[in-house]
Amino acid sequence: MPIDPYILLLLGTVGLAALLPARGTGADVASGASTGAIAFLFFLYGARLSTREAMDGVRHWRLHVTVLACTFVVFPLLGLASRGLVPVFLTDPLYQGLLFLTLVPSTIQSSIAFTSIARGNVPAAICAGSFSSLVGIVVTPLLAAALLGGGGGGFSADSVVKIVLQLLVPFLAGQLLRRWIGGFVARHKKVLGLVDRGSILLVVYTAFSEGMVEGIWHQVSPARLAGLLAVQAVLLAVMLALTWYGAKGLGFGREDRIAIQFAGSKKSLAAGLPMASVLFGAQASLAVLPLMLFHQMQLMVCAVIAKRRSRDPEAVASEESAARVRTAVGTGSRSG
């Protein structure tokens, strides 16, 4: 099988972060660029999606409940079950970090980007990821306090404001301006594709740079690190299979199943890091090591899956059919 060029870009980004991690002012610039790319991504989605499509995404409650159940029920149960792997595969601190990663909300930007690449239900993915993040502000600290025995509320009004400003405001701005720029965005899909992929590369570089600067990659032995990676690979594989085949069993269509798989199998590094600093204090750097490794793993694996899904005959046929409908509607409106 030929190597996917995008995977080479991801690996190259990881290598760049390992050799030249962003520090000081550079780290601030990288973080700002990542934030800006994500905001622009949501602006473009808002400009591309019709208001009717967005409302259909909000009303898709069965999909949102399914994603929330995967994120805050199935994941934590698998995390608790991994307790049996101590001390053979995991040390107790690594297990605590692994359990913590199963409690954090789903990632938003990469779930939506991969759903878009795979030609899935983007409006539903936007809502599902946003709901997961908002619910996680309250649920994640409560679950961590109950299962890890730690304190700390973790609820912050700043977190809500950040989500609103970075995700919701750009999306609404795109919706408001769609009347004037929607056609331009639709005609330049390659630009949106570059933003999809570029935003993920920025997130990978920023996250991996932070890990290198903090030195957390050197706090565990190679054998323990290998054991942790193996456990996480199994965890990710189980969740990818459960979200895909479970959604099929629940009667969801292909586009919804793609949104469920990408939103229900991921964990957010951006949400997990600040929560970990409150819950773990001085031990936060080691506690988030499993989350950082899982974050890189899920991006690389899901990049391959998204590209494969985009080439499914069913996806190509659906896209061509939708294009014919849009053309017919446009021709009809002009002739009328």
Image (cartoon, grey):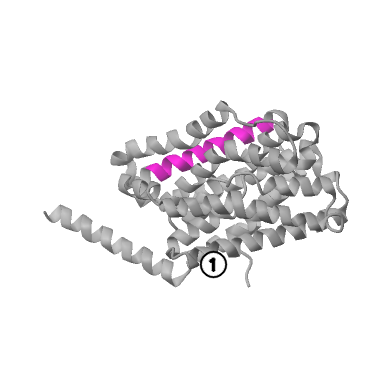
Q: Position of residue 248 (x, y in %)?
A: 48, 67
Please, what is the three-letter code of the amino acid marked with disc 1? Tyr
Q: Is residue 237 above or below residue 76?
A: below
The residue where tag 1 is placed is 245
- In the picture, residue 232 is in which quadrant? bottom right
Residue positioned 47% across, 69% down in the render: 312
Q: Is residue 328 above or below residue 312?
A: above
Q: Position of residue 79 (x, y in %)?
A: 70, 53
Q: Of helix, strand and loop, which one carries label 1?
A: helix
User: Can see residue 136?
Assistant: yes
In the foreground, 322 or 80: 80
Q: Main secondary structure of the magenta part?
A: helix
Q: Is residue 250 above or below residue 173?
A: below
Query: Does 187 appear in magenta?
Result: no
Query: Does 30 appear in magenta?
Result: yes
In the foreground, 307 or 77: 77
Residue 129 placement, left or right of 296: left
User: Can see residue 299?
Assistant: no
In the foreground, 83 or 16: 83
Residue positioned 68% across, 56% down in the render: 78
Residue positioned 66% across, 44% down in the render: 205
**Start-end of magenta stretch:** 26-46
Residue positioned 61% across, 43% down in the render: 202
Residue 301 placement, left or right of 332: right
